[in-house]
Image: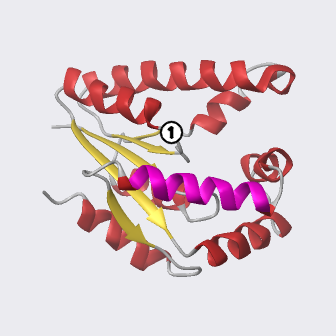
Amino acid sequence: MPRLIVLNGPPACGKSTLARLYADAHPLTLNLDIDRIRGLLGAWRDDAAKAGTLARDLAVSMARTHLAAGCDVIVPQFLGRPDLLERLEALAGETAAEFHEIVLLDTKENVLRRFADRTRAAVEPEHVEAHETLGGPERLAEMYDRLVALVATRPRAKVVQTSAGRIDAAYQGLLRSLVP
């Protein structure tokens, strides 16, 4: 049975890294990074809200196709509202896939520090864009609070604690969270 794994969490908590590790260890897994899809849309910054909606719609379509083929999909994405989570959970039901909602969390102070550190060393286009579009540490703190509040309303979400530099421990936590 294929898995649809939503890997949620604030920026700089390791979502992309863990998704890449999972995909590398599970052949034909689709590492469905919505920010990368958005980046494929021409002049997306001219209407970022519409581009975000289109990217999410494309991601759901891609996930549907891949799950129907019997392959895993992992979605590393900050989701501070339930709408896409609910769409993905429904998609898992429609395609007879296991649905896993995993939330990577560190303390708010560490998240702010990790984001600042990542921004200084940014190489990936998505990380540079995150810095440019986020709006500063106050906005990141608001995102963190919104995520924590959302997690409290999602009883099936599993939290994996992360900390800077402990990639293997976080990955093992991700794998443990997938065991029924």
Write down the region rendered in magenta.
138-151
Secondary element at image label 1: loop
Q: Is residue 20 visible?
A: no
Residue 74's x, y, as percent?
A: 40, 44
Residue that appears at 30% across and 25% down: 91
The magenta stretch spans residue 89: no
Q: Quadrant of the C terminus?
A: bottom left
Q: Is residue 84 visible?
A: yes
Instruction: State the residue in front, 155 or 134.
Output: 155
Q: How is the image coloured?
A: secondary structure
Residue 129's x, y, as percent?
A: 80, 45
Horizontal relation, residue 50 to residue 63: left or right? right
Residue 84's quadrant in the figure? top left
Instruction: State the residue in front, 12 or 126.
Output: 12
Q: Tell me the chief SS of the magenta region.
A: helix
Instruction: State the residue in front, 94 or 67.
Output: 94
Residue 58's x, y, as percent?
A: 53, 20
Q: Does 32 appear above or below 179?
A: above
Residue 157's x, y, as percent?
A: 31, 53
Horizontal relation, residue 99 to residue 166: left or right? left
Q: Which residue is mark 1?
A: 81
Report the label total: 1
The magenta stretch spans residue 143: yes
Residue that appears at 59% across and 79% down: 164
Residue 109's quadrant in the figure? bottom right
Look at label 1 and name its amino acid.
Arg
Residue that appears at 57% across and 81% down: 165
Q: Does 94 appear above or below 141?
A: above
Horizontal relation, residue 115 to residue 43: left or right? left
Crowdedness near tag 1: few (<14), some (14–19) or many (≥20) residues, C-alpha within 10 Å: few
Q: Quadrant of the N terminus?
A: top left
